[in-house]
């Protein structure tokens, strides 16, 4: 994957738009997990991908038009696309612990393909 540093230009719905800036960070995943009785530990390792999160106030659970731009270290445009995503409610602590609010996932491959994912 080419080095990228920033992304997301705007998100629009209901006749208004919001701008946001995304900083990407190297991703990691669980490499090993061990459990001893009720206690578990996990070790992480780099995955080679990059991830980021942008908080967009008022995000609805209906289609949102997103204009995405990823730039490289020198400011060159690596990916520039517009797409529609539909945010969904998430329950990070389980369905009985309340909704954290709507979220959408946008995935970009190393080849520059963009999609909701």
Image (cartoon, helix red, strand yellow):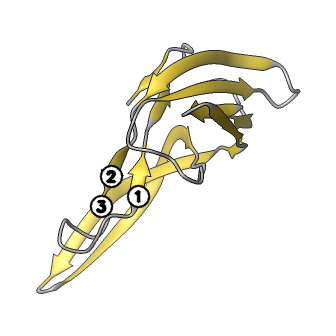
Upstream in sequence: badge 1 or badge 2: 2
In-image side of 36 versus 5 (left or right) = left
**Location of mark 1 (residue):** 101
Relative to 53, is 85 above or below? above
Upstream in sequence: badge 3 or badge 1: 3
Q: Percent from the top left, x then y, of residue 20? A: 70, 43
In-image side of 46 versus 93 (left or right) = right
Query: Nearest the camera: 45 or 95?
Result: 95
Q: Percent from the top left, x then y, of residue 45? A: 45, 54
Nearer the observer: mark 3 or 1; the answer is: 1
Q: Secondary structure at mark 3?
A: strand
Q: Percent from the top left, x then y, of residue 39? A: 21, 85
Q: Are marks 1 and 2 in contact (CB under 8 Å)?
A: yes
> What whole-number distance in Å separates the C-alpha atoms at marks 1 and 2?
5 Å
**Location of mark 3 (residue):** 32
**Location of mark 2 (residue):** 89
> What whole-number distance in Å separates the C-alpha atoms at marks 3 and 1?
31 Å
| Within-10-Å neighbours for mark 1: few <14, some 14–19, many 20+ | some
- Quadrant of res 21: top right
Relative to 32, is 36 above or below? below
Q: Residue at x 61, y 30 (%)?
A: 15
């Amino acid at each position: 994957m080419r080095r990228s540093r920033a992304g997301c230009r705007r998100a629009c719905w209901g006749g208004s738009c919001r701008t946001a800036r995304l900083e990407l960070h190297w991703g990691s995943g669980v490499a090993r997990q061990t459990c001893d009785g009720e206690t578990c530990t996990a070790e992480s390792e780099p995955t080679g991908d990059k991830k980021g999160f942008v908080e967009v106030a008022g995000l609805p659970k209906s289609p949102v038009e997103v204009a995405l731009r990823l730039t490289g270290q020198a400011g060159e445009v690596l990916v520039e696309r517009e797409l529609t995503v539909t945010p969904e409610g998430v329950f990070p602590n389980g369905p009985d612990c309340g909704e954290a609010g709507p979220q959408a996932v946008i995935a970009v491959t190393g080849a520059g393909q963009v999609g909701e994912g």
